[in-house]
Amino acid sequence: MNTVRHTSRGVNSILMNTHQLIQELREPAASKIVLLVADGLGGLPLETGGKTELETASTPNLDALVRDGVCGLSTPVLPGITPGSGPGHLALFGYDPLEYRIGRGILEALGINFPVGPKDVAIRGNFCTLGADGKITDRRAGRPSNEKNAAAVAKLRTIQVPGVELFVEPVREHRFVVVIRGDGLGDAVNDTDPQAVGVPPLKAEGADPASRKTADVVNQFVAKAVEVLKDEGPVNGVTLRGFAKLPKIATFEEVYGLKAAAIAVYPMYKGLARLVGMDILDPGTTLKGQVETMKKAWKDHDFFFLHYKYTDSTGEDGNFPAKVQMIEKFDAVIPDIQALNPDVLIVTGDHSTPSKMKSHSWHPVPTLLAADTCRTDGVEHFNESACLRGGLGQFQAKHLMLLAMAHAGRLGKYGA
């Protein structure tokens, strides 16, 4: 299977017509659109009848914003489908995630600005902890420091596999990137991460001859990785996921006519933005720095994508109180963004990450849109139960950019 089907015959005609329609109807305007993505925003109550993290948090600024706007619940892919961060964000950017199936390896590689070429297969790597029996005891190796990550990557760089070039680059904490370069490589390879502890990493297998060649390289690399990491304590194994070759995809500016900027801390989300042609701004490592970066670049762009990670990571850790705190921290910067007077301000998530589940989930995501042209819906609080009654209803996230463009006065009339 190709990573992305983007030929005139392979792309879903509805998707193509939607993008073509936007290109036909879009109109120039001086309006500004801001998309704030609190990763993994949606949650669940710990007990039946209780409150979710968002319902528990004190969010006076988001509540005020939703009273002046309109809200609903967005479905990243399809009802019941649990999305990864890649599909979740592509949907928010208006690209159908069922058609643009982009492996996480490419996103990680682009996120660190690695020059991926046509002969490359990019792979997202995780350091893990293996017991004496070869079974995984910690899928993230205790979230090592970036310094520990770099030291472990240095050892992985000593690995050689005949017939290909290997590139290993650090990302942060337990994450790294592997790029395999060579002739005749495919990317239809299963993840070696079993997404569970108490079991060994999976063997890589390819779905076609080219991908079997890649899988053979991967299995050799993983075996050698265990050997070179044997003295690295909890960072003594690797799992690989998101095998992908470089896709072709229409840029954000080609589709929407918007000069877009991405303000993200984690490399993968920079990679998603770079994939669709957004300018990547460097905000440092703090939420305050992200907001300050937006202020400085305000005159130079029409669209701003700001990504906030920590609502997701605390949910994956199963830390309900910490996720509540991260939501409240996110709420605190809303006035600073409102002070810029964006014409359209959207707040949402790419998926839900309930602390109760310690993982991504299929639950629809609270979404609000504030603009002078909103038809308000009487909702007074920004949370899951309130958004269920919102004027946007439950909708597919891939349609959010249509609403953003319309409320920004950037779409003309369709038909006579």
Image (cartoon, rainbow, N blue to C red):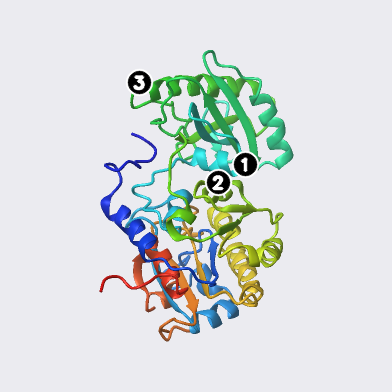
User: Where is residue 356 shown, x and y percent of the image?
Assistant: 48, 59
Of tags 2 and 3, the one toward the viewer is: 2
The alpha-carbon separation of the residues under discs 2 and 3 comes to: 29 Å
The alpha-carbon separation of the residues under discs 2 and 1 comes to: 7 Å
Closer-to-camera residue (21/10): 21
The amino acid sitting under disc 1 is Ile
Which numbered disc, 1 or 3, marks the residue that appears first in the sequence? Answer: 1
Mark number, residue 271: 2
- The quadrant in which the C terminus is found is bottom left
Residue that appears at 40% across and 30% down: 189
Residue that appears at 65% across and 36% down: 170
Q: Can residue 393 be seen in this view?
A: yes
The amino acid sitting under disc 3 is Pro
Label 3 neighbourhood size at 10 Å, few (<14), some (14-19), many (20+)? few
The quarter holding residue 341 reads bottom right
Label 1 neighbourhood size at 10 Å, few (<14), some (14-19), many (20+)? some
Q: Can you say whether 1 is above or below 344 in the image?
A: above
In the rendered view, does 65 fall on the left or right side of 332?
A: left
Classify mark 1: helix, strand or loop. Answer: loop
The quarter holding residue 377 reads bottom left
Which numbered disc, 2 or 1, marks the residue that appears first in the sequence? Answer: 1
Closer-to-camera residue (107/382): 107
User: Where is residue 158 shown, x and y percent of the image?
Assistant: 66, 20
- Identify residue for label 1: 112
Q: Can you say whether 182 is above or below 125 in the image?
A: above
- State if disc 3 and disc 1 touch (CB < 8 Å): no
- Identify residue for label 3: 209
